[in-house]
Image (cartoon, rainbow, N blue to C red):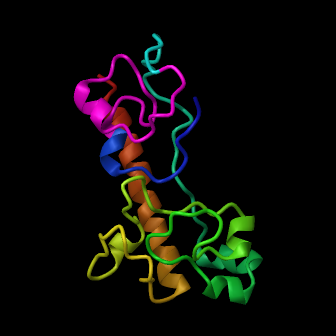
Amino acid sequence: KDGPYGVLPVRSFYDRNPGLSSPLLTDEEKERSFLPHVKNPDAPGRNIGFQAEVGSVSHPEFDSLAKYLSEDALQAYPNCGEKNVHGGSVNEEWSFYKYLPFTDQTGIDHICQLLSPPLVSANSTSSRMDNIQDYTEAAQVAQFLQYKALAEGYSYRMW
């Protein structure tokens, strides 16, 4: 099984094989599983020490975005709480370049948590960062926190 590729709640990276069901998971780990679509969750041999296909979103810096998105698309950056890859507040150009939202399966937007004050409501899709530069900087921080949790979660399960 590949993935998951989107944003995950940070605590899930400390589980054995985030997003992958296993008969070796503890009851607590099973409760926190957000991706129950594994075809045969009772299959043996799913205790992989580190699943190489686990990842998260990657978001370019503003200067890179400006090279391939139009000015209109730059100003149409996604709203907080966006869950859709296509439609919603996602501009067509963003979708063309495979935009992945920063909203996890629990509805928390990992970019908009960096607003001041933080936006932690899963239902606030009308809020936005002040500008595209702030949005891209917050995206960089959000993806740093995702990959930091991935590395720490791997270390946590090493021994």
Q: Position of residue 121 (x, y in %)?
A: 31, 70
Whole-percent x, y for residue 127 in the image:
41, 83
User: Is 121 drawn above or below residue 146 in the view shown?
Assistant: below
Query: Which range is magenta?
Result: 14-40
Q: Is residue 71 left or right of residue 22?
A: right
Whole-percent x and y of residue 140? Answer: 48, 67
* Left or right of 5, for residue 93: right
Give the percent coordinates (x, y) of residue 120.
Answer: 29, 70
Vertical order, 3 against 132 (above or below): above
Secondary structure character of the magenta stretch overall: loop
Q: Please state, as top left, top right, bottom left or bottom right, where the C terminus lies in the image.
A: top left
As drawn, which residue projects farthest toward the top? 44
Which residue is more in the foreground, 141 or 30? 30
Looking at the rendered image, the quarter that the N terminus falls into is top right
Check residue 10 for magenta coloring.
no
Residue 152 shows in this picture: no
Magenta stretch: includes residue 29: yes
Q: Is residue 82 left or right of residue 155?
A: right
Which residue corresponds to the image point at 74% horizontal and 78% vertical from the top-left? 67
